[in-house]
Image (cartoon, rainbow, N blue to C red):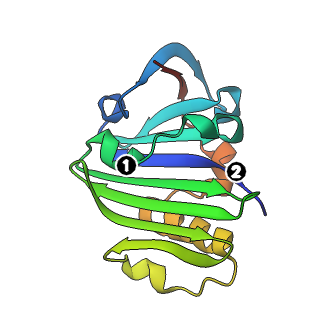
Amino acid sequence: MSWNGADLFATGGLGSLPPGFSASGRTSQVFEDFPVAAAVREGGLHVHFAAAALQRVPESMAALSGAERALAVLYAGVADTYVLEAADAGRTSRLLVLSEGEVVVDEGAPSPHEAAPREDVEEWLFGLVEQLTDVAVPALHGVAETWAELRTG
């Protein structure tokens, strides 16, 4: 499928943005309008990085948010590399890096949802994120939220 992008899901509102990011006054109902955008739903923060903004994804994004609970996912389908990071109160509790179908990094206790077969890593990760966040990642455009453009620096 070759999906390229990244997402951060964190408890709390815009105050849970990773350092270096701030919301501008521009908003849209379509996240594709902004390379980096944030939406708040049911008290939880969702930051989406479009493919063009992947170079701005900070390392340890979930931990950097400092949120009580955070999940960060990177989909680099063209490079066939995928990253899943979970963090609690600013500390990484799970880090899984898969590249070309192989596990490169496997730290922390896996979620019970990770037990599903990984025949297609990208589809497996989409399913895992949906189970953990109730958001279907490839269908983000269907999420009727107000997205705020994020600035860096």
The location of residue 35, given as percent across then percent down, is 65, 30
Q: Taking 8 as reference, is 79 above or below it?
A: below
Q: Secondary structure at mark 1?
A: helix
The residue at 70%/50% (across/down) is 4
> Residue 62 — which label?
1
> Residue 4 — which label?
2
Left or right position of 101 against 66: right
Q: Taking 105 as reference, is 135 above or below it?
A: above
Q: Secondary structure at mark 2?
A: strand
Q: Quadrant of residue 16?
A: top left
Assess disc 2: are there few (<14), some (14-19) or many (≥20) residues with their C-alpha within 10 Å of its C-alpha. many
Q: Taking 110 as reference, is 66 above or below it?
A: above
The location of residue 127, given as percent across then percent down, is 57, 70
Q: Label 2 to label 1, Cα distance in Å?
A: 18 Å
Residue 18 or 100: which is nearer the viewer?
100
The location of residue 46, given as percent across then percent down, is 46, 42
Q: Amino acid at mark 1?
A: Ala
Q: Taking 136 as reference, is 47 above or below it?
A: above
Q: Amino acid at mark 2?
A: Asn
Q: Quadrant of residue 110?
A: bottom left
Quarter of the picture holding the C terminus: top left
Left or right position of 24 against 68: right
Sequence-first tag of 2 and 1: 2
Left or right position of 135 against 32: left
Q: Residue furthest top?
A: 25
The residue at 52%/64% (across/down) is 130
> Residue 100 — which label?
none
Quarter of the picture holding the N terminus: bottom right
